[in-house]
Image (cartoon, grey):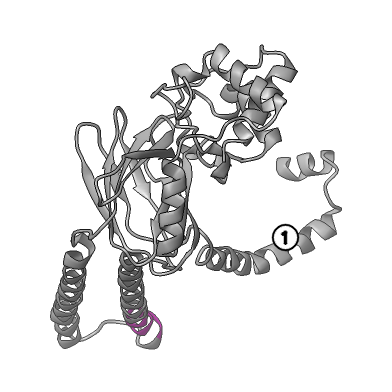
Amino acid sequence: MRLTDSGRKQGGLPRSSRGAAAVVGARAGPAILLALGLAGCSGQQSALAPAGEGAERLASLFWTMSAGAVVIWALVVGAAVYASRLRPGPHSERIGRVLLWGGTAFSTAVLTGLLVFGLMLMPDLRAAGDGLKITVSGEQWWWRVRYLAPGGSGPIESANEVRLPLGQRVELELTSPDTIHSFWIPPLGGKVDMIPGRVTRLVLEPTRTGTFRGACAEFCGTSHALMAFSVVVLEEAAFEDWLADEAAPATAPGSAAEALGQELFLQVGCGACHTVRGTAADGAIGPDLTHLASRATLGAGTLPNSFDALVRWIAHTEAIKPDVRMPSFGALPDEHIEAIAAYLEGLE
Ligand code: CUA
């Protein structure tokens, strides 16, 4: 009764419409759940829309196990319906023995089959890489990414975005200075923990180009949910061009506003934490900003990368990302924040 009263107080629907809505809701509920579930099967962050060798194997394991689960579910429910509805009452000892030994043999066979199938996938998942190496360090709460080209050049540092060449088996070395994170790009491969004091490995072999989304898959602190990254798979030649651009120092300010922004950036101390290669800014605590403008997002997948978002980020960092190590610079005059944002927006 209380619920109905409060519903009426809040200006809810009349009783008859509420009843109808509830019936429609009850009927639509499973359909909505199914639609939501299926929507999760595609898109940038779906393990069931594989774009990499590892993810393809894991998806095949998932579908095999799901099919097995459906068959077992049907058998168990079928036996229960038979015993309770079709032939209720006491059953012979023979049926009991069939169920006992049949059930034991069946479970053993199915679980052994799945174990063998799962083990057979492992050597391929763990095979070594054959070219580029990338180290990724999970920070609070962003990703430090370093490219080590086979020629021995580098490392070339970037952040919150991983670019991969199509068709190569790229080895990722995963670490963390202080907290356990879990590195996961669902469409490309399995998830691997980043553990302080250890180096864990993941080999990814993309099978199609595109932009995907990765995320931290283990609770690591206040802003765990604001710790994503973009993954861009490029044709090999396009990747080489991009890597060469990424290795170059930052472009010089192209306008008076950008030049003022650069001056302020250095003056207020941004360079103590951030590096902009080719300038005096060489801090190593926060993300390298040398080519910030070429990335899709700000704050590790938290905001789109635009001028307005940069202004918001600089002024309200702690409100946008709780417990982030970067302090808010909201005390600066608006025109100074805008000049710094203009400078950063020019760092292609
Ligand atoms: Cu990093 Cu959760």
Residue at 29% from the left image edge and 54% from the top image edge:
132
Q: Position of residue 111 (x, y in %)?
A: 19, 71
Q: Amino acid at mark 1?
A: Ala
Q: Position of residue 14 (x, y in %)?
A: 86, 53
Residue at 37% from the left image edge and 66% from the top image edge:
52
Is the C terminus in the top left, top right, bottom left or bottom right quadrant?
top right
In the image, is 34 to the left or to the right of 28? left
Q: Which residue is mark 1?
A: 22
Magenta span has 63?
no
Dot 1 beta carbon under 8 Å from ligand 1: no
Residue 343 drawn above or below residue 70: above
Q: Nearer the viewer, residue 222 or 272?
A: 272
In the image, is 204 to the left or to the right of 252? left
Q: Position of residue 324 (x, y in %)?
A: 49, 24
Is the N terminus in the top left, top right, bottom left or bottom right quadrant?
top right
Q: Nearer the viewer, residue 284 or 1?
A: 284
Task: Magenta stretch: give its range.
Answer: 78-85
